């Protein structure tokens, strides 16, 4: 959110190039947890020969995908997982603290009235993670948060600009 506030100001930048950290991708996660063999094995497969993956390896990789999904890609969450043998209670505690930090930032950078609405949208979107986000659900979310669709769309764009959410476009995957 601070990025968006600073975007409106002309600030001098120190020499060098700014670098924005983001979540680890699955292949980076594999390397971070020491699963180099799985990383290299996975990179040998393409869409054309993926059907050749042995079932035992497929099940093992699915378990790693589940671990990645529960841990998330935030570097500190991955580090906590490694240090505490992927004790998800410790990881979840940090994730909850991180979400609260985002909520606090809404009030800090957008004013208390707007923050209440943003928190409502944010919580509503979080409640739909793992499910398809439809226009009907978005309208219900806007009504529950005392807003309208236009305000919801603006909030979603702000969340995307702040890299809190990513837009995932629908695909029929006809070519796969």
Image (spheres, rainbow, N blue to C red):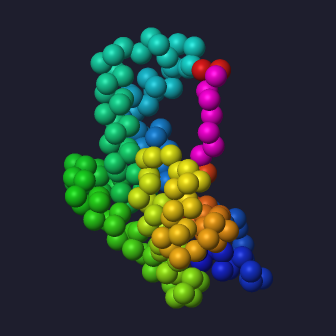
- Closest to the observer, 94 or 115: 115
Q: Residue at x 36, y 29 (%)?
A: 61
The reply, left or right, for residue 116 in relation to residue 76 is right
Examine the structure image and report whether residue 171 is included in the region drawn in magenta.
yes
Tell whether 83 sits left or right of 119.
left
Range drawn in magenta? 168-174
Task: Where is residue 49? Give x, y as percent.
Answer: 52, 13
> Is 164 in front, or is 137?
137
10 or 127, which lies in front?
A: 127
Residue 2 is covered by the magenta coloring = no
Quarter of the view holding residue 18: bottom right
- In which quadrant of the rendered image does the C terminus lie? top right
The image shows residue 63, relative to residue 80, as above or below, that is: above
* Whether residue 109 can be seen here: no
Image position of 121 (left or right of 85): right
Identify the residue shown where x is 45% and y is 80%. Answer: 104
Residue 103: quadrant of the picture: bottom left
Q: Residue at x 55, y 59 (%)?
A: 138
């Amino acid at each position: 959110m601070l990025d968006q506030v600073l975007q409106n100001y002309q600030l001098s930048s120190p020499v060098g190039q700014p670098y924005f950290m983001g979540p680890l991708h699955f292949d980076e996660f594999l390397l971070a947890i020491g699963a180099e063999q799985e990383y290299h094995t996975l990179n040998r497969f393409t869409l054309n020969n993926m059907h050749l993956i042995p079932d035992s390896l497929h099940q093992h990789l699915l378990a790693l995908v589940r671990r990645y999904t529960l841990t998330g890609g935030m570097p500190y969450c991955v580090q906590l997982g490694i240090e505490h043998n992927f004790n998800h209670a410790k990881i979840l505690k940090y994730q909850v603290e991180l979400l609260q930090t985002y909520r606090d930032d809404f009030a800090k950078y957008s004013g208390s009235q707007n923050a209440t609405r943003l928190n409502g949208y944010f919580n509503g979107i979080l409640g739909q993670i793992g499910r398809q986000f439809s226009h009907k659900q978005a309208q219900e979310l806007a009504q529950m948060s005392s807003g309208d669709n236009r305000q919801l769309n603006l909030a979603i764009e702000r969340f995307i600009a702040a890299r809190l959410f990513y837009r995932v476009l629908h695909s029929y995957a006809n070519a796969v």
